[in-house]
Image (cartoon, rainbow, N blue to C red):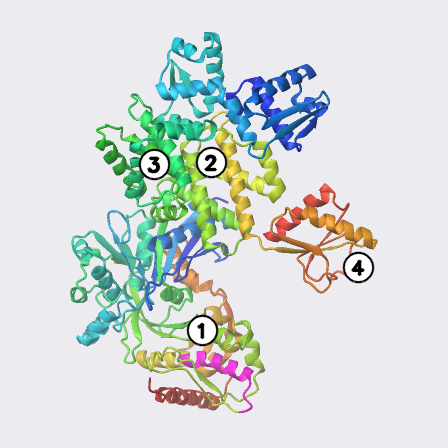
């Protein structure tokens, strides 16, 4: 599910116009924009007019200027694309439907059409559209209710309020003493400290849980099955006792599965700090496949990178992130794609080279095979967890990277040599873990970039030599990155 | 491919855990190693987190599988070898250790050992266990834990706590809490095991107020102790079928199956173990009597002597004196020395062990002249390793009354040809280096493989032995006697030097 799925088609187009402008230094020709959107010039003009009228709320802090030839974005430093997204989302009917469902748990068509001031047919159409996207969460809006497994419902609401809706508003309006006490109880009972950012996540989850806890006929079939191996887990045991004690304070009778819901959430999202989590990893029960999968994947990564002795803290860090990834894959399905998947993949490839992406895919396959994950059509969770694997691998390769010394030794006219060397240095600046300079014969290098093959084989001693085909060409740049990656590992 | 079977050896050492997968021809198919945290709560105390040890073992199992491509179900049996004496006490119900693992080197229970000694229990304990009272062994460590963890004594008496050395802990974890066992070799290092009657000694247990109920069942070194819980072995229920403490595993790995066979592992210190056959030989010279291994219904005893400073003296040359850059440089330098072996280094940095037992002695150097070079000094340091080994082996010979036809060697310094030639010369005995120096892991693999029929018999294993070089004594007898006499003189002089504090 994507953020855009909460918007209407024309709204998505308008957002795309902003995105394209941001990606192109704030200015784009009509031709290029039309090419990208595949619409007529008249439709584009309509969209731009709509944008202008919407942007009035920003009081000239965000403006889109267009003259039939070019489109230009003017935006003050205090504003960003996120604010524009928020504006559109605030006006979304689909979001209002989800909000209404969360607040009232069920609705009648009459009430909702009145509340949203739309026709019945429009409401049905929007619910139908929402249902097509909720499918990957195995959820459905039916008979005025959000139906599905309780864990999936809470998980969806969590994603929705954490990533889509304005979380600050939710926390301000719904958080109360009970929620604050619940956070304190958790801290005391588990003897952990929850840092502010994680506290915000936990608060949202607890608000959702509080709203859902008294619902009747909750479904737990998948959760019960997945929790079977956790019966003896020491953390689960603590959560179980804590949940029962907490709710008994308010004379609320809860299902035994309530603790399971909290346990799954606690492990799937960064709530505990790395230190606290490490304490748990030392004692966790390995009946559940997550623990052994974490170990297996960590060792696979270590062997892949040929690390002789990865730093202890890096290994701990790997466990921390991997458990979150694996817990999500184990318990949940569906996700809200807050990042543009393809764009992220392309960006990561640029940063760390192509080889990490297929390796991340291998890791994902190992995990899903191990969990025998339920096949869910268009399961965005798989995409998002793949991105997380890639990010983790990137992080590891950065942390483990030694600084590679690179010397540029161009054989050409002195003036060209100096200029092109500087340009090459400039172009390589974003690459992590390298130090580039013009070649000095007295120094030792790991890599030499030259345009002329040296006559003697050991002219550069042990340094690896890369012969440039066309200086500054994208081919050479990609090849150099590959060589750097190889040298790092 | 899936029909091919392998043996996995888990070598849980003092600083790291390793897993090695062997095929039937003893080729290493895959291996993995992981270090874990050393905890030093106070000066002289060394502890490990038992769960970190356990997690490191889980990691190396995974690493060996990934590296080799072998599937868990292809493992015919698992052999475990471990750091000995290290003591773990845990809750039977929750599986959580009640205190860190107290490591063999740790001295925190030394006052308890002193009390036993002063109360006159030395002879009784030596006779029954073959050991000399020391905090090194598990007995005083258990007492220390029961004393220092609130309510532990009561819980132990109620049968709520379990004690184990690392082998017991790992088998208990790997089998999902189903097998609570140890083996003869590890039991005989606890100072609680009667090596004659082959049972936990009630008198010593009572003396230390350790409830029998917390002790594991003692089994042979080669039999199926239980199967791995599938969630602890990546999906397979594999038999754990071999177990031995590290030095005994090395003895077995060196195939020192006959009485009189001796192995020496040159590590930081040196561990020399001699197979003394089916009757225990108590030492008159403070060597330790221990169970080497028990297999096919027979028990083979051993004498054990250790040298405190062996490889660490070469580290001292490298890190302390900066005479060499790498430990491996010592061989080339020793070869360059032109003197007539008149320099003697006595590396008694922490005192002298068997047969001198002088904890107040300190290192010394003799025979220096204006012409002494760095090469001479390095050579003398290497020679000290060999001289000390002879000290122990001579003592063993005296205690057991068995001739020693061959010394089998392994460990890091066994790669040093010059050292091994000098060792053969000074002993007047053939020295044989194993081709595969990982004899500890190999020993555990043999024990495991024999129990599950992976290898049919010890004869089959013997046929597979590959030596990595034999060093025949070449030194004239007169020269040997002269040098060793001078070494004894140097040691004597070292012992005389006791300056005022």
Q: What stretch is highlighted in magenta?
A: B370-388
Q: Where is residue A85 in the image (x, y as percent from the top left)?
A: 53, 26
Q: Mark 2 lies on which chain?
A: A
Picture coordinates of residue A73, whole percent (x, y): 64, 28
Disc 3 chain ID: A
Q: Which chain is home to disc 1?
A: B
Q: Is residue B478 or residue A330 the one in the foreground?
A: A330
Instruction: Identify residue for label 1.
Output: B312
- Residue closer to the observer: A121 or B183: A121
Q: Nearer the viewer, mark 3 or mark 4?
A: 3
- Does the image show residue B211? yes
C-alpha span from label 3 to label 4: 66 Å
Residue A33, relative to residue B471: is it above or below?
above
Q: Mark 3 points at which residue?
A: A263
User: What SS does tag 3 mark?
Assistant: helix
Q: Closer to the N terminus: mark 2 or mark 3?
A: 3
Task: Report the magenta stretch's main SS.
Answer: helix
The secondary structure type at the circle numbered 2 is helix
Which label sits on residue A455?
4
Q: Do residues under tags 4 and 1 come within 8 Å of each other at their CB atoms?
A: no
The circle drawn on residue A369 is 2
């Amino acid at each position: 599910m994507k953020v855009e799925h909460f918007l209407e088609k024309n709204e998505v187009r308008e957002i795309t116009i902003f995105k394209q402008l941001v990606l192109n230094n704030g200015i784009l020709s009509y031709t290029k924009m039309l090419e990208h959107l595949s619409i007529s010039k008249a439709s584009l003009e309509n969209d731009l007019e709509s944008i202008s009228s919407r942007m009035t709320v920003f009081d000239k802090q965000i403006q889109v200027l267009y003259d039939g030839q070019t489109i230009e974005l003017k935006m003050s430093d205090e504003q960003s694309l996120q604010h524009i997204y928020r504006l559109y989302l605030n006006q979304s009917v689909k979001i209002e439907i989800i909000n209404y469902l969360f607040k009232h748990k069920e609705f009648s068509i009459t009430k909702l059409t009145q509340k949203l001031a739309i026709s019945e047919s429009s409401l049905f159409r929007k619910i139908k559209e929402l249902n097509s996207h909720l499918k990957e969460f195995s959820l459905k809006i039916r008979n005025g209710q959000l139906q599905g497994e309780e864990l999936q419902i809470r998980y969806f609401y969590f994603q929705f309020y954490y990533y889509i809706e304005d979380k600050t508003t939710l926390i301000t309006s719904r958080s109360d003493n009970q929620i604050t006490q619940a956070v304190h109880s958790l801290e005391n009972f588990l003897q952990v400290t929850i840092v502010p950012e994680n506290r915000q996540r936990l608060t949202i989850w607890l608000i959702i849980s509080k709203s859902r806890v008294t619902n009747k006929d909750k479904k737990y079939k998948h959760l019960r099955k997945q929790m079977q191996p956790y019966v003896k887990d020491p953390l689960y045991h603590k959560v179980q006792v804590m949940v029962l004690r907490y709710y008994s304070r308010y004379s609320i009778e809860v299902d035994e599965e309530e603790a399971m819901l909290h346990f799954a959430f606690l492990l799937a999202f960064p709530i505990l700090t790395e230190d606290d989590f490490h304490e748990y990893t030392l004692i966790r029960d390995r009946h559940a496949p997550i623990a052994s999968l974490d170990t297996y994947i960590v060792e696979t990564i270590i062997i892949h990178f040929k690390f002789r002795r990865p730093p202890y803290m890096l290994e701990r860090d790997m466990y921390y992130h991997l458990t979150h990834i694996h817990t999500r894959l184990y318990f949940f399905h569906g996700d809200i794609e807050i990042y543009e998947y393809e764009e992220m993949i392309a960006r990561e490839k640029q940063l760390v080279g192509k080889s990490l992406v297929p390796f991340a895919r291998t890791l994902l396959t190992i995990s899903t095979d191990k969990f025998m994950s339920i096949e869910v059509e268009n399961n965005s969770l798989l995409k998002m967890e793949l991105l997380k694997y890639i990010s983790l691998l990137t992080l590891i390769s950065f942390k483990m990277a030694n600084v590679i010394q690179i010397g540029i030794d161009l054989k050409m006219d002195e003036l060209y040599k100096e200029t092109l060397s500087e340009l090459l240095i400039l172009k390589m600046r974003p690459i992590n873990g390298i130090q580039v300079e013009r070649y000095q014969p007295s120094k030792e290098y790991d890599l030499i970039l030259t345009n002329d093959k040296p006559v003697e084989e050991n002219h550069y001693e042990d340094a690896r030599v890369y012969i440039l085909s066309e200086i500054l060409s994208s081919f050479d740049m990609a090849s150099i990155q590959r060589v750097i990656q190889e040298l790092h590992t | 491919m899936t029909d091919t079977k392998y043996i996995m050896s888990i070598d849980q050492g003092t600083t790291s855990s390793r897993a090695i997968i062997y095929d039937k021809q003893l080729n290493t198919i895959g291996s993995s190693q992981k270090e874990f945290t050393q905890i030093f709560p106070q000066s002289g105390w060394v502890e490990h987190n038992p769960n970190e040890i356990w997690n490191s073992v889980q990691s190396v199992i995974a690493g060996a599988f990934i590296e080799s491509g072998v599937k868990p179900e292809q493992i015919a049996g698992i052999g475990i070898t471990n750091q000995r004496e290290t003591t773990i006490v845990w809750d039977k119900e929750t599986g959580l250790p009640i205190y860190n693992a107290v490591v063999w080197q740790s001295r925190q229970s030394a006052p308890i050992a002193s009390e036993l000694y002063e109360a006159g229990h030395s002879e009784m304990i030596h006779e029954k266990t073959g050991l000399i009272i020391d905090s090194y062994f598990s007995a005083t460590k258990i007492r220390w834990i029961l004393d220092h963890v609130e309510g532990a004594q009561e819980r132990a008496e109620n049968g709520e706590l379990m004690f184990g050395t690392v082998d017991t802990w790992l088998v208990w974890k790997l089998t999902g809490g189903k097998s609570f066992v140890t083996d003869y070799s590890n039991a005989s290092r606890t100072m609680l095991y009667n090596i004659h009657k082959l049972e936990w000694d009630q008198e010593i247990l009572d003396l230390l107020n350790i409830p029998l109920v917390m002790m594991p069942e003692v089994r042979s070194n080669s039999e199926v102790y239980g199967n791995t819980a599938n969630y602890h072995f990546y999906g397979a229920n594999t038999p754990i079928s071999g177990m031995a403490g590290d030095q005994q595993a090395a003895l077995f790995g060196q195939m020192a199956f006959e009485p009189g066979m001796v192995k020496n592992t040159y590590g930081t210190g040196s561990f020399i173990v001699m197979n003394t056959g089916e009757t225990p030989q108590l030492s008159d010279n403070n060597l330790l009597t221990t169970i080497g291994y028990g297999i096919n219904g027979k028990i083979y005893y051993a004498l054990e002597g250790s040298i405190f400073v062996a490889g660490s003296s070469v580290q001292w040359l490298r890190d302390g004196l900066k005479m060499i850059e790498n430990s491996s440089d010592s061989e080339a330098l020793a070869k360059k020395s032109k003197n007539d072996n008149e320099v003697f280094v006595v590396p008694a940095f922490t005192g002298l062990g068997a047969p001198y037992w002088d904890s107040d002695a300190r290192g010394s150097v003799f025979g220096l002249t204006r012409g002494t070079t760095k090469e001479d000094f390095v050579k003398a340091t290497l020679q000290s390793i060999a001289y000390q080994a002879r000290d122990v082996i001579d003592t063993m010979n005296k205690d057991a009354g068995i001739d020693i036809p061959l010394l089998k060697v392994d460990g890091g310094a066994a790669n040093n040809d010059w050292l091994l030639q000098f060792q053969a010369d000074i002993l007047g005995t053939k020295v044989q280096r194993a081709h595969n120096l990982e004899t500890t892991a190999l020993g555990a693999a043999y024990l495991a493989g024999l129990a599950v029929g992976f290898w049919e018999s010890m004869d089959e294993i013997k046929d597979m032995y590959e030596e990595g070089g034999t060093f025949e004594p070449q030194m004239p007898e007169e020269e040997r006697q002269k040098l060793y006499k001078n070494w004894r003189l140097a040691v004597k002089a070292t012992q005389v030097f006791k300056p005022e504090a």
